[in-house]
Image: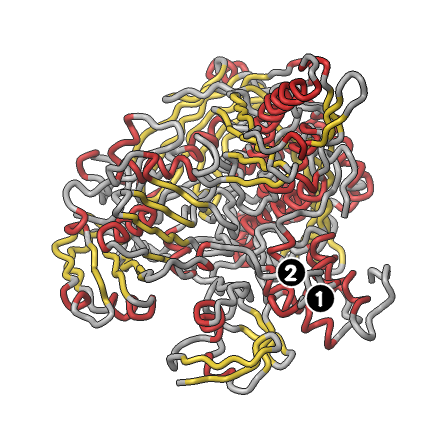
Amino acid sequence: MVVTFNLNGNPVEVEVEGRTTLVDCLRHQLGQTGTHVGCEHGVCGACTVLVDGEAVRACLTLAVQAEGVQVVTVEGLSREEDLTPLQKAFRKHHALQCGFCTPGMLTTAHALLSNEPTADADRIREVLSGNICRCTGYIPIVEAVLEARSAYPGGPPAGDAK
Amino acid sequence: MTVAFPAIGRPIERVEDLRLLRGRGRYVDDLSCNSQLYAVVLRSSVAHGRIRKIDGAAARAMPGVHAVFTADDIGEPVPTIPVRLFPCPEHEPFRQPVIAATKIRYVGEPLAMVVADSPAIGEDALELIDVDMDSLPAVASHQASRENGSLLFEAHGSNCALHYSISKGEPDKAFAAAEYTRREKFYVHRHTGITMEPRGVLAEWDAATGHMTVWGATKVPFANRRILAKLMDLPEDAVDMIEGDTGGSFGVRGEFFPEDFLVPFAARRLGRPVKWTEDRREHFLAISHARDVACDIEIACRRDGQVLALRGEVWTDVGAYLRTAGAISPRNVGQFITGPYQIENVSIDVAVQLSNKSPSGTYRGPGRYEADFFRERLFDLAAKDLGIDQVEFRRRNLVPEDRMPYALPTVAPVPNPTALDSGAYALVLDRCLAEARWEDKIKLQGQLIDGRYHGVAVVCFIEGGAAGPKEEARIVLETDGSLTVYVGSSAVGQGVETVLGQIAADAMDVPFESIRVRHGSTTYVKEGWGSYHSRSTVMGGSAILAAAEELKARLKDAAAKRFNCAAAEVTIGEAIVRAPDGRTLSLQALAGHDLSAEGIFANHRHTYSYGTHVAHVAVDSRSGHVELIDYVAVEDAGRIVNPLTLHGQAIGAIVQGLGGTFLEDLVYDESGQLLTATFADYMVPLATDFPNIKAISLQLRPSPFNPLGAKGAGEGGVIPVGGVVANAVSAALASLKVEVKELPLSPPKIWRLIQDAKHSRSAD
């Protein structure tokens, strides 16, 4: 069957099997390999993408369910060559090592800060607890997300680490 | 961002991040070849059995299926995977066949491989394969293994593959004369690395040139090329292993697994590229497992707390086969039992026990995590008996600086003598106590506050690094004046491109931005050794220094011809070569004349980072839940190339250690079924679990054994965690007479310890 949706600002139309997941469609049919597959049952969060602005597990979403929605993947977070403030904060705080969980961390954190730009460390930890990272121990990820808040509308001023 | 000179020592943001943050990494499943097929693996659902027949006819007949391979298709004899680390004849009988031929020895062992037009078709076809086999009683614990009731290898006559003997001094004499001895049994449960990226292999066979290209290599691509070439009867230079981005290794990923043969085999047989990516359940069954070690160990001390001797027996349950990492972890449990302490008499027998569980390999701090748990628990029990403060007990026994290099116990068979290289052990202990505000913390020891018992503990540790024999690097001056560094080290997420780039920039006296590091793949250097035993910075970095020296000499030669002066008169600095009369040339002006140089760093002497950890816990005796209130780690890494990446690995390793201590558990039932083969059952640390960790890295005592002075430091964080946390929990529950002797410290286990202690008290 054919499904049409908007991917990172561009309309796409793709023929999929009924059993094809959104993440397999993105990776293997649309060539957007930035979204990763870590567990295929919604526990690890590596495949998290934004669907109409909400953080969604692309491994638990069938491609056909994406009909008519706006999908943003890690590739769509920064359109230009420059990194977004959230990505810059990840780099500055060394919030990634192997980088495999990073796309899911970024999309999850971006959805959080878009909705709750004043989220505190506890709230950030709570929301990120749906994404597994084996390298960093999470501490630098939380630091990066805290710092990036100031770049979101309604976020605290830069330098406020609470 | 422009990086100031020198680059070494600066917290430079990683060059890797620019692609990884934008979804532009190239992990193995991101790659594809034209007209590729997809492999899926049929894995055994029983732990122990004898194969009668595996019939793939129905699967083969399915539309979209190109082949079903079993042992019969691979032919007699089915190749077995060789041991890479410290091989010995005793290992040989226990090598793993690349596919089960006559016996099945663990759940997850490959029985057949289907190659199809898509993974989904392949998985559908797996259901049609008929496996006819006779089940045998499973051996699912080290105790069952030792009973020899059911044998994995009947011809061997025992489930004990071999023994290692670890020795130093005259332990029996020391015990006979000792004023105090204590004997205890401890156990560290099975857990392992579990990388976020599942493993994968993509193989392409070029029949015209007889060349095999394999993507997905990491950790030890050169060793794996050697193995694959041999198993496929190809010359080594007919095989290339290509390393891309890698989603974590922690020691477990990147060794030679059965699929590393089966996928290239299928590609050659079918004449089409073949790709295989494991799913998470397969990963839990197929990746190297680790730990699973029991001991019965005894300590001898003087009344003043000086440790005179350690002796005892260790049983390591290594699972069904000895794979590439051989029995390194069992060896290490024995050889590193003394840690950073001066203990002159040691006798440990390590039995390598086989069982019907996934084969073990090396996982971050292999053997050391277990040894440190055993030793530090024993130390606290002894200190308590002797009425000596836990800090003083350790301080009294640390190896003093004037005794360096200090020899560790020897191992047989295949001795690998090693000695602690340098260190101010007591200084770092004191620094950690100060950072942790020990004087305040210790007042809480054993206190019941708001319904929870508080406990604090301190332990010291060492971390080995810089395994030999050597590493290679090549530096090429490009036509634009930039430098490309090719190195045999591989990247598993630790920032090799950045860290080795910093070393190269300083060695060549050029800006960091003009260096590009290419690593790992077998196409880059003649021979490489890879990334394990915390060796990349020291070994790869030192090889780069050697290559840089040689390249600078060649640049001087080339410049001397242009300047018409002697090479010795030319100076190089800040990417400029200078003649004695002041004339200058840029590196770009010299480029285009095939200017490159190779360097090798050979070294057999290990580096030993060392340090101290302090843990503060609060235990709820009603639920058994432990909260980690505070955790402070101080480690001396000799010389720090990039404080940002080192700090990240220190924190990450500690959290991994906390996962292994509290949460992670590869639980098998009696029939050899793995009960925790999903992320919902195998609990790993989450963002909410351990927020309060402080790690401090020092550069007090450089290693005397390499020109950088650096010491391997990627694993240290994990090593002391089990011991220090178990000591803190025991200290917290001292009034309840609880002593932790087994991991993990999950709430039900702690609750059970409290109940057992209560019952034994009321029975007294």
Q: Chain of mark 2?
A: B
Q: How many residues crowd around disc 2 within 10 Å: few (fewer than 14), some, or many (20 or more)?
A: many
Q: Residue at x 54, y 23 (%)?
A: B601
- Which amino acid does the dot numbered 2 rest on? Ala
Q: Residue B657: x and y, percent? A: 58, 46
Residue B391 can be seen, yes or no: no
Label at residue B549: none
Q: Is residue A20 left or right of residue B600?
A: left
Q: Mark 2 = which residue?
A: B687
Q: Is residue A150 above or below residue B661?
A: below
* Residue type highlighted by circle 1: Ile
Between the residue at mark 1 and the residue at mark 2, the CA separation in whole angstroms equals 9 Å
Q: Is residue B580 above or below residue A75?
A: above
Q: For mark 1, give the secondary structure.
A: helix
Q: Are marks 1 and 2 in contact (CB under 8 Å)?
A: yes
Residue bearing the label numbered 1: A124
Residue at coordinates 45% horizontally, 21% vertically from top-left? B416
- The spot of residue A125 in percent (x, y) is 69, 64
Residue A14: image location, x then y, percent: 45, 79
